[in-house]
Image (cartoon, grey):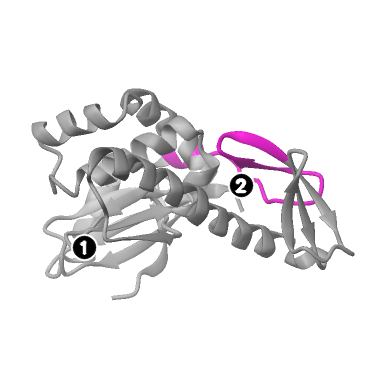
Amino acid sequence: MPAEADTVRLAGRDVPVRWRRSSRARRLSLRIDAREAEIVITLPPRAEREAGLALLRSHAVWALSRLDHLPAAAPWHDGGQVVLDGCPHGIVHCPDGRRGVWIEDDVVKVSGEAPFLRRRLTTFLRQEAGRRLGARLAQIAGASGLRPRRLVIKDTSSRWGSCSADGTVMLNWRLVMAPVDVQHYVLAHELAHLRHMNHGPDFWVLVASLTPHRHMAEAWLRRHGPALLRAA
């Protein structure tokens, strides 16, 4: 069922809320969508909105604090910066260029008309995510023997990756902006789910055997992840 946008009065403020009805949800849940700077309330099939509102009001301080501490959106523009593998690259608009988008001397150059710069850059980064993350995933898979059936690059609002029961690994294209060690952890995490579709002790033992970067990467994503989700 499509999510529905709403505005809710919370502690004297109007805050954006998106309602999601999920047939798979077993309980009410509340999260912050960093990319859209809104609260998302997920309702199980039989739950009423009043129950969702009660949950939100009981967590009002937490929700408002999370919204207030989200990084400001940083739109890409000529003269700005974009990050690849954790390294900042300048953005240069080349209106007369004929190469689409390309990297030259740590600068990302974007051809075409200025109104399409952000869209072209987004397309380029998604392609880079498929190429770079795909190669790194294959490298870890080859060394571990954990081979995914396929890789899907998506644009998700909160998750960096997932692994389905059929062996499909999904990665958020924005992960390509994170440092390589952070990427390594996320890739290893999802590959470990090919053997353990849970987060039990055996899963974490396997993750530790695949990557040394877990705790650093989790801390980095908590601190910097929202900024990656808001970049565009």
Decide: few, some or many residues near mark 1? Use Cα within 10 Å; few <14, some 14-19, many ≥20. many
Q: Is residue 101 left or right of residue 43?
A: right
* Foreground pick, 30 / 93: 93
Q: CA distance from mark 1 to mark 2?
A: 28 Å
Q: Is residue 91 magenta?
A: no
According to the picture, the residue beneath numbered tag 2 turns out to be 73
Location of the N terminus (image quadrant): bottom left
Task: Kindly identify the residue that appears in the image at 16 percent across and 70 percent down.
Answer: 23
Task: Give residue 29's position: percent from left, percent from top.
Answer: 23, 52
**Of marks 1 and 2, which one's residue comes earlier in the chain?**
1
* Foreground pick, 47 / 100: 100
* Foreground pick, 45 / 147: 147
According to the picture, the residue beneath numbered tag 1 turns out to be 43
Decide: few, some or many residues near mark 2? Use Cα within 10 Å; few <14, some 14-19, many ≥20. some
Q: Which labelled disc corresponds to residue 127?
A: none
* Foreground pick, 102 / 114: 102
Q: Is residue 38 left or right of residue 207?
A: right
Residue 41 in sight from this viewpoint: yes
Task: Kindly identify the residue that appears in the image at 19 percent across and 46 percent down.
Answer: 193
Nearer to us of marks 1 and 2 is: 2
Q: Is residue 72 magenta?
A: yes
Task: Kindly identify the residue that appears in the image at 31 percent across and 29 percent down.
Answer: 211
* SS state under label 1: strand
The magenta region covers 66-89
